Image: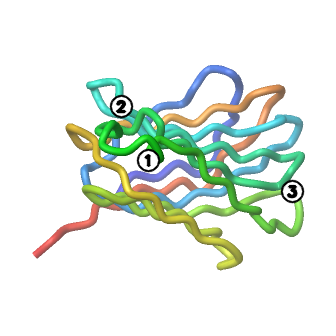
Amino acid sequence: MKSVSKTSLGSKARTYSIPELCEIDMEISPKKAESVEIELSNAAGEKVVMIYDAKSDSLSFDRCKSGIVDFSQDFPAVTVSPAYTDGDKVGLRIFIDRSSIEVFGKDGRFAMTNLVFPNSPYSRLSVRATGGSARLSDLKIYSITVE
């Protein structure tokens, strides 16, 4: 398990290595930031971008550049969910599998599931703030093993 207790976020991304199958647990306090961007990527440049928008209290999930997307004109898409936060922070649990990513609000108020087909596993987590500073706390990255 990798763990980070607290770190400030600005326009320069904080990047962490992640295992192929994992659970990511984190809390985001947007503070003065307009949004906080969470990116999962691999060495091939494929990526999934999730953005917590503080003003609209929503989480978007962009899989347009997630890997193999050309099998349907409707597959490259951005989905959006209300985050239903009750204050100044949002807790997220993100589960990464070989072909799916699930995002849960820590308090159980929302869930998002998206299929993804990367050519190689996502190996990096990057987090940054836009339009001001934010705080990332209680980041934990757990490896998931398959028996």
Instruction: Tell me how far mark 3 sits from mark 1, CA to CA.
Output: 33 Å
Residue for badge 3: 88
Dividing the picture into quadrants, the one containing residue 78 is: top right
Q: Secondary structure at mark 1?
A: loop
Q: Residue at x 36, y 59 (%)?
A: 100
In this view, 76 is above or below 146: above
Count neighbours of disc 1 (C-alpha within 10 A) and say few if under 14, some if 14 to 19, many if 20 or more: some
Residue 123 in sight? no
- Image quadrant occupied by the C terminus: bottom left
Residue linked to disc 2: 46
| 51 on left or right of 57 | left
User: Residue most toward the top?
Assistant: 12
Q: Label 3 amino acid?
A: Asp
Residue 35: % across, % down: 76, 38
Q: Residue at x 45, y 59 (%)?
A: 114
Question: Badge 2: how crowded within 10 Å, few (<14), some, or many (20+)?
Answer: many
Residue type indicated by callout 2: Glu
Residue beneath the point at 31% across and 41% down: 122
Quadrant of the frame with the N terminus? bottom left
Q: Position of residue 111 (x, y in %)?
A: 59, 70
* Camera-side residue of 23 and 48: 48
* In the rendered image, the vertical position of residue 105 relative to residue 139, given as above or below: below
Q: Position of residue 15 (x, y in %)?
A: 47, 32
Q: CA distance from mark 2 to mark 3?
A: 31 Å
Q: Give percent across and percent down for residue 39.
A: 51, 38
Report the amino acid beneath label 1.
Answer: Phe
Q: Reading the chain from its start, which is encountered first: label 1 or label 2?
A: 2
- Cα distance, mark 1 to mark 2? 15 Å
Q: What is the number of the mark on residue 104?
A: none
Q: Which label was assigned to residue 75?
A: 1
